[in-house]
Image (cartoon, rainbow, N blue to C red):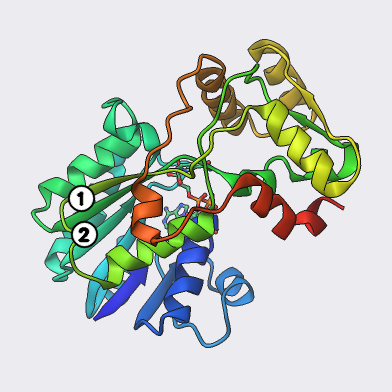
């Protein structure tokens, strides 16, 4: 039973690959850039070229695959662009697709993630939708430099609360769905058990790092201007502004018990995540 992981060089895809390796699964990592994948992934992982929009890469990547981990790549705004790949997935005899979606997909039919979920459902294959909250690992990627270099975190979220999730926990659930029974036709809303405000995030960083980390919360327009000055790509800045405005309005705070139930333990907390990764901001 070979598991193919699309986007294996990404934050979630690479975590899923590492977890599959840890449980001894038969896997294939799909990546657009083989050199990048080889540098990032554990030695010995079989890597195949896979571009979800390049049909030439599909036959070799999909041969003999029964389970697929699929994401909506960040720059694919229209799920229809992935339909030819889904047709190839069906033709190749894949049995089950685990979709990396987003928490709000169950409530917002306009999200491209929901559009992808619906297209996967329409294939007739078994599916599992993973709908995660805000990744704690964003503190290690988009927010890392400002925390490390300026001891500040700038997010236009006011005092809104954000449900968060650890990508390691998310990968653990992804691997359960990819390798075990009982997850067919299920959608999981995956959050940790807390939804901190950004003041609380800054306070946790301050306590663990032993230096004050200041939370700055400009309005949406000021945030966009600042992002332009610091060289953040326009599309990313726009997505972040929408996301953090939703948070400011109190619409991103919902936590659920799905993750803890699936893990059989408490999800990773903000405090533990910051402690484990403290060196990244020092
Ligand atoms: N960040 C959050 O807080 C959050 C929360 C919930 C849900 N999500 C969702 O999670 C998804 C992003 O996951 P992530 O954080 O793991 O992304 P990521 O770190 O940005 O990685 C994206 C991956 O997709 C690959 N990719 C891009 N275009 C591709 C294509 N045409 N064909 C094949 N692979 C392609 C990239 O490959 P290269 O290395 O070649 O670029 C990379 O491996 C998005 O749908 C996002 O909305 C994010």
The image's mark for residue 183 is 2
Side of 136 where 265 appears, left or right: left
The image's mark for residue 4 is none
Side of 85 where 257 appears, left or right: right
Q: Position of residue 262 (x, y in %)?
A: 34, 58
The answer to the question of whether label 2 and label 1 lie on touching residues, with beta carbons closer than 8 A, is: yes
**Can residue 3 be seen here?**
yes
How many C-alpha atoms fall within 10 Å of the one at disc 2: few (<14), some, or many (≥20)? some
Q: Residue at x 55, y 56 (%)?
A: 11
Q: Position of residue 237 (x, y in %)?
A: 62, 28
Question: Would you identify the image quadrant in which residue 7 lies?
Answer: bottom left
Q: CA distance from mark 2 to mark 1?
A: 6 Å
Q: Residue at x 34, y 71 (%)?
A: 4
Side of 46 where 258 appears, left or right: left
How many C-alpha atoms fall within 10 Å of the one at disc 1: few (<14), some, or many (≥20)? some
**Can residue 54 be seen here?**
no
């Amino acid at each position: 039973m070979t598991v193919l992981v699309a986007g294996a060089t990404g934050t979630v895809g690479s975590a899923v690959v590492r977890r599959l390796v840890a449980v001894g699964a038969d896997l294939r990592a799909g990546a657009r850039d083989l050199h990048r994948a080889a540098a990032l992934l554990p030695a010995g992982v079989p890597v195949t070229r896979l571009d979800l929009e390049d049909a030439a890469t599909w036959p070799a990547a999909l041969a003999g695959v029964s389970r697929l981990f699929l994401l909506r790549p960040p720059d694919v705004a229209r799920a229809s662009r992935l339909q030819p790949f889904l047709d190839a997935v069906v033709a190749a005899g894949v049995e089950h697709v685990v979709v990396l979606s987003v928490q709000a997909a169950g409530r917002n039919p306009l999200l491209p993630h929901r559009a992808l979920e619906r297209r996967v459902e329409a294939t007739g294959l078994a599916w599992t939708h993973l709908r995660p909250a805000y990744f704690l690992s964003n503190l290690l990627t988009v927010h890392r430099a400002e925390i490390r270099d300026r001891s500040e975190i700038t997010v236009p979220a006011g005092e809104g609360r954000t449900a968060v999730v650890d990508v390691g926990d998310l990968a653990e659930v992804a691997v359960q769905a990819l390798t075990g029974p009982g997850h067919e036709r299920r959608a999981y809303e995956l959050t940790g058990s807390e939804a901190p405000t950004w003041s609380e995030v800054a306070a946790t960083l301050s306590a663990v790092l032993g230096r004050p980390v200041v939370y700055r919360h400009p309005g949406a327009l000021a945030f966009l201007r600042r992002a332009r000055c610091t060289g953040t790509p326009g599309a990313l800045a726009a997505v972040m502004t929408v996301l953090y405005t939703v948070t400011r309005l109190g619409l991103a705070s919902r936590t659920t018990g799905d993750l803890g139930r699936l893990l059989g333990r408490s999800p990773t907390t903000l405090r533990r995540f910051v402690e484990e990764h403290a060196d990244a901001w020092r």
